């Protein structure tokens, strides 16, 4: 069996006999309607999208509440289209050991965000002109919305696009802004730009990025002056909270599918370093909460479990998850998992010190100041994370993946809890015993040496070149002035959310860092001492 339109049509019984759910709707029927009158365009056609948003679209198609699929767009740097006629297999890995296998058929067109004048870009311009288009969603990681680098200056391609205008746009954000300008010039129909990336106040990041392009281009005469007002007044940028663990395609899942007789499952690494395959693997648990702010209407996503609410509630849900109940615990496991040589998050959950670490950071230090959104229970949420989601042996997520872009995450995942303690009259910030350990652990991680003193590869991080020089001279087991080396980082409230000196936590972080750098084995020894 090959994952192609022909195979799914002619060998449907064979697929179903192997336990695959193959949707009954006719994609050949919905495809022309989607392309002529699109509802939904998605930028970033990666693993999370195929496991979650594309599956939601498929469920709406199966229910008959939506009659159009999704148009997926990838960065030009990804360098390749979706394989297999835009079909993919979703393996939902449940904690009880069972696997649901679903053929995802809702992606009806796949494009690359090539530059103005190219075939794909002309197709996208036509889609953006369509009055029917209701929403454009993004899954491009938090750093994908950044206009500036670690030095605070515009990134070179962004600076060039702001200067030259939409007709010569080369950056990802610049090209999307050029598509918005195409919509403005052809009816100025409203539109929702929806980030489904796991970052705080993601709608504001979208607003800031495209507002900058619209304001600058309008001001310097690269576009009609009314473009800035159009983006400000008719383009909405709802806040969202998304939660679904979707690691890169795993070889064990590939073997399971191959044993079923599915052919052509090889994984590919794109020029940008993204791992893609004809299949994705994901956990069963998922949440998507969206601010109901859609000026041109929206697909009925609430019919398939998406929660629509007001901005304040989205903010509370996001704070609950990102600041307390999941993301901080993930970062704990990412940092110390890399240092201790773990390759899977689920394996870390059999390590008593690491379990005690996340239980203390979550229940003892986080929950007392958690933001309760009302629509989800924080205690139940964290219970599921620690006892069901992270230990799931069928979810082959890695600390190395979670460690990506850690410098962008620390301020939200731990800084807000520190701020809450500082602001609460009945709380003492010095009661935070293990959050400073995690902060020190990240500095130790930046040294690129594991607990045995052996080098390991650091995960990508946009500030790596900025922060690594501070630890470059540190040695294991050496007498050294740690504070002189790292104090500039500890003062950095952009990284940590607070100035750790002003917050009173710098001494604790430095104390832990001294212990963690005492020599080989010091990381394990420090963990044992700290959590018991």
Image (cartoon, helix red, strand yellow):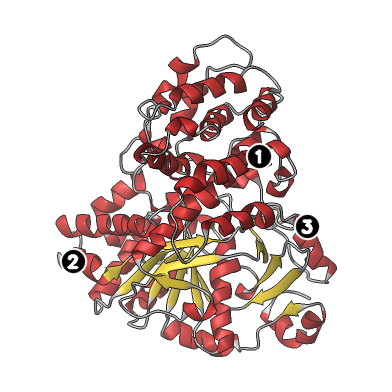
Residue found 41% across the figure and 85% down from its top = 37
Sequence order check: which comes first, mark 2 or mark 1? 2
Q: Neighbour class for label 3 at 10 Å: few (<14), some, many (≥20)?
A: few
x and y percent of residue 172 in the render?
40, 57
How many marks on residues?
A: 3
Q: Quadrant of the C terminus?
A: top right
Which residue was labeled with disc 3? 252
x and y percent of residue 15 in the render?
77, 80
Q: Which type of secondary structure does the marked residue at label 1 adopt?
A: helix
Residue found 79% across the figure and 76% down from its top = 1
Spatial distance from mark 1 to mark 3, Cα to Cα? 29 Å
Sequence order check: which comes first, mark 2 or mark 3? 2
Q: Is residue 91 left or right of residue 1?
A: left
Comparing 179 with 322, the one in front is 322
Spatial distance from mark 2 to mark 1, Cα to Cα? 52 Å
Sequence order check: which comes first, mark 1 or mark 3? 3
Q: Is residue 168 above or below residue 356?
A: below
- Label annotation for residue 194: none
Comparing 20 with 81, the one in front is 20
Inspect this view and state whether residue 239 appears: no
Image quadrant in which you'd find residue 527: top right
Which residue was labeled with disc 1? 356
Inspect this view and state whether residue 289 appears: yes
> Which label sits in the foreground, 2 or 1?
1
């Amino acid at each position: 069996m090959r994952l192609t339109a022909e195979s799914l049509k002619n060998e449907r019984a064979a697929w179903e006999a192997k336990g695959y759910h193959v949707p009954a709707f006719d994609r050949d029927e919905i495809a022309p309607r989607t392309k002529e009158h699109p509802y939904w365009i998605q930028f970033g056609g990666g693993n999370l999208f195929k496991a979650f948003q594309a599956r939601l679209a498929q469920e709406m198609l199966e229910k008959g509440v939506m009659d159009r699929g999704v148009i997926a767009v990838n960065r030009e740097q990804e360098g390749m289209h979706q394989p297999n006629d835009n079909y993919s297999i979703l393996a939902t890995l449940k904690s009880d050991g069972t696997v649901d296998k679903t053929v995802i058929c809702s992606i009806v067109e796949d494009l690359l965000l090539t530059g103005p004048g190219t075939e794909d870009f002309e197709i996208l311009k036509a889609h953006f002109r369509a009055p029917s288009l209701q929403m454009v969603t993004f899954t491009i990681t938090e750093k994908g919305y950044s206009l500036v680098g670690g030095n605070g200056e515009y990134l070179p391609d962004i600076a060039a696009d702001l200067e030259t205008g939409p007709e010569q746009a080369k950056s990802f954000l610049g090209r999307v802004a050029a598509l918005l300008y195409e919509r403005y010039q052809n009816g100025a129909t409203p539109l929702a730009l929806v980030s489904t990336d796991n970052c705080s106040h993601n709608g504001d990041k979208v607003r800031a990025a495209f507002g900058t392009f619209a304001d600058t281009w309008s001001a310097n005469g690269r576009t009609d002056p009314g473009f800035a007002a159009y983006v400000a007044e008719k383009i909405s940028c709802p806040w969202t909270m998304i939660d679904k663990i979707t690691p890169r395609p795993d070889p064990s899942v590939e073997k399971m599918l191959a044993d079923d007789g599915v052919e052509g499952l090889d994984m590919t690494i794109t020029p940008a370093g993204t791992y893609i395959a004809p299949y994705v693997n994901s956990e069963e648990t998922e949440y998507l909460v969206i601010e109901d702010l859609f000026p041109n209407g929206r697909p009925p996503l609430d019919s398939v479990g998406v929660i629509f609410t007001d901005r304040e509630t989205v903010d509370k849900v996001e704070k609950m998850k990102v600041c307390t109940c999941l993301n901080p615990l993930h970062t704990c496991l990412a940092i110390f998992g890399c240092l201790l040589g773990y390759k899977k998050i689920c394996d870390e959950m059999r390590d008593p010190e690491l379990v005690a670490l996340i239980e203390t950071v979550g229940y003892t230090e986080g929950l007392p100041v958690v933001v309760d959104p009302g629509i989800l229970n924080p205690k139940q949420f964290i219970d599921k994370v620690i006892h069901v989601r992270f230990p799931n042996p069928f979810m082959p997520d890695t600390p190395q993946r979670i460690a990506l872009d850690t410098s962008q995450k620390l301020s939200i995942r731990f800084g807000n809890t520190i701020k809450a303690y500082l602001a609460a009259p009945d709380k003492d910030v010095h009661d935070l015993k293990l959050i400073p350990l995690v902060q020190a652990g990240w500095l130790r991680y930046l040294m690129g040496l594991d607990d045995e003193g052996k080098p390991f590869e650091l995960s990508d991080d946009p500030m790596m070149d900025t922060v690594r020089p501070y630890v470059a001279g540190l040695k294991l087991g050496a007498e050294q002035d740690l504070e002189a080396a790292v104090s500039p980082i500890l003062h950095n409230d952009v990284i940590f959310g607070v100035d750790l000196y002003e917050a009173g936590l710098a001494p604790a972080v430095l104390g832990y860092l001294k212990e963690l750098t005492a020599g080989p084995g010091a990381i394990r020894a420090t963990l044992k001492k700290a959590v018991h």
